[in-house]
Amino acid sequence: MADANTSSLTGYDNWYQSDWLGSFFDASSNDPDWVFHVEEKLGWMWVKTDAAGNYWFNHTTRGWLWTGADYFIEGDDTKSHFYSFSLGRWLYFHPTNGFYDYEANGGSYLD
């Protein structure tokens, strides 16, 4: 899953730091297309790149999510969004509280 915005973490095999996604473990050397994100609410995800350089993530509880550097930058509250395929709308991601649905019950966290 490493791209031009990603660098390896020195001394840590298969760990990377992305300008937009943050720190993650790329398990693709043992198990193709799986990554583990250090944010507890993201955790293990299956990932595929689309033609535009954005990413589809299959999250263990949220299903298919789509995002990229234009929509998500770790630590930037204005760019912390994933598009949920199953819900058909954007979700806000907070590292501690998880996914926030602007439309559910007038706005609420899903996790």
Image (tube, rainbow, N blue to C red):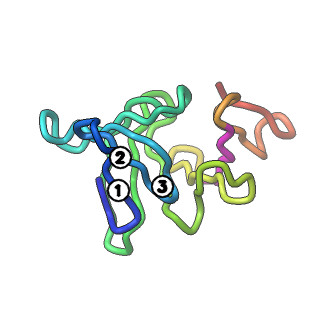
**Contact check, label 3 and label 1, Cβ < 8 Å:** no
Decide which of tag 3 and tag 1 comes sooner along the chain: 1
Q: What secondary structure is marked by label 1?
A: strand
Please provide the residue range marked out in magenta: 89-94
Q: Residue at x 23, y 44 (%)?
A: 33
Q: Residue at x 68, y 29 (%)?
A: 96
Which mark, by number, is residue 16? 2
**Contact check, label 1 and label 2, Cβ < 8 Å:** yes
Which mark, by number, is residue 54? none
Q: Quadrant of the C terminus?
A: top right
Relative to 50, residue 27 above or below:
above
Which mark, by number, is residue 66? 3
Which mark, by number, is residue 7? 1
Q: Amino acid at mark 3?
A: Trp
Tell me where residue 39 appears, x and y as whole percent.
Answer: 53, 32
Q: Residue at x 58, y 57 (%)?
A: 72
Q: Amino acid at mark 1?
A: Ser
Q: Residue at x 23, y 37 (%)?
A: 13
Residue 10, quarter of the rendered image: top left
Decide which of tag 1 and tag 2 comes sooner along the chain: 1
Q: CA distance from mark 3 to mark 2?
A: 20 Å
**Disc nearest the viewer among 3 and 1:** 1
Question: Badge 2: few (under 14), some or many (20 or more) residues near its Cα, within 10 Å?
Answer: many
Q: Amino acid at mark 2?
A: Tyr
Q: CA distance from mark 3 to mark 1?
A: 22 Å
Tell me where residue 51 appears, x and y as whole percent.
Answer: 32, 73
Decide which of tag 3 and tag 2 comes sooner along the chain: 2
